[in-house]
Amino acid sequence: MSKKQYIYIVILLSFCVSSLYAQESSKPVFQLEDNTFFDPDANKEVKEQYSFGVEYRIEAGFQQDYQRARDITFPDLYLNGARLGATFTFKLPLHFDLQTGLLYTLLYGRHEQHWRSMDAVESQTEYIHHRVLAHNLTVPVRVFYIIPVWKELNLFFYTGPQLHIGMAQNDYPERHLSEGAYNWLKQQGLPTDPYDRMADELVRANIQWGVGGGLEWNRYRLQSGYDFGLNNLVKHKQTPNQYMSEWGWYVSFSYKL
């Protein structure tokens, strides 16, 4: 075989190899840059942030309400006690939740009203010791914002209104009065015997606005908040200064069912 024939063979082989390479590189590429098509779990974490659902919780805790008045007709009063109930939460996109439910509170408070004696020769103080037992229902409407911290640990904040419904607020007066002071109070129409303040003095619907927050771990949640009274609770105003609102704070523990 001559040298010229060798050259022809090498050129022919080179042409065949280059043709095969060109054909191989011209084939369509089916491999996606986003390999989540072949790995469905790759975007699972992102999708879960935008999932919808409903969570149910039971809640129990401590609550303190404060009745604030502008005049002496309705004395300031602290009410302390327990709260218990259930809530359900609508899971929303972008770490937001919407929560509502029904809570029952049983609160106890006491205060004293003092007067100068009308019968004694020398000055002395007479008084009525009031013991108040309140039963309330609360319907909250809260918007929550959840901040993931670490694994199943979350930090959250909330705000929103709630309707605080007074079922009963029974006052049990204990009198330490002379006969003259007792008769004078009766003439003035001031209560000296047990009665329900909701039936005679106060509006049952207390509209409040609340803010708060807490921590969440797995199914457990610890939260606290403050609720600001927005409306006048005096039922029959005799003067413009007769204004009373009820504020409160609480701390509670809840469990997701």
Image (cartoon, rainbow, N blue to C red):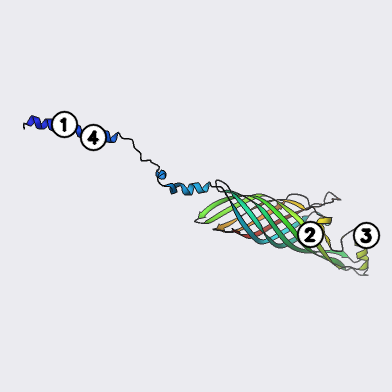
Instruction: Give SS at disc 2.
Output: strand
Q: Secondary structure at mark 4?
A: helix
Would residue 185 appear left or right of 248 to someone viewing this image? right
Q: Amino acid at mark 3?
A: Gln
What whole-number distance in Å separates the C-alpha atoms at marks 1 and 4?
Answer: 13 Å
Q: Secondary structure at mark 1?
A: helix
Q: Earlier in the sequence, mark 1 or mark 4?
A: 1
Task: For the C terminus, give its image quadrant.
Answer: bottom right
Earlier sequence position, callout 3 versus callout 1: 1
The residue beneath circle 2 is 169
Rounded to the nearest angstrom, the CA distance separating label 2 from label 3 is 24 Å
Please provide percent x and percent y for residue 151: 49, 56
**Mark 3 to mark 4 CA distance (whole Å):** 115 Å
Residue lying at the far bottom in this picture: please name it: 121
Q: At 28% from the left edge and 35% from the top edge, which residue is drawn? A: 25
Answer few, some or many: residues within 10 Å of disc 2's Cα (few below 14, many 20 plus, some between 14 and 19).
many
Which residue does the image show at 64% across and 59% down from the upper left?
59
Residue 49 appears left or right of 76? left
* Residue 132: x %, y % from top left: 78, 63
* Label 2 vs 1, first from the N-terminus: 1
Mark 1 sits on what residue?
12
Q: Amino acid at mark 2?
A: Gln
Q: Left or right: 154 with respect to 246?
A: left
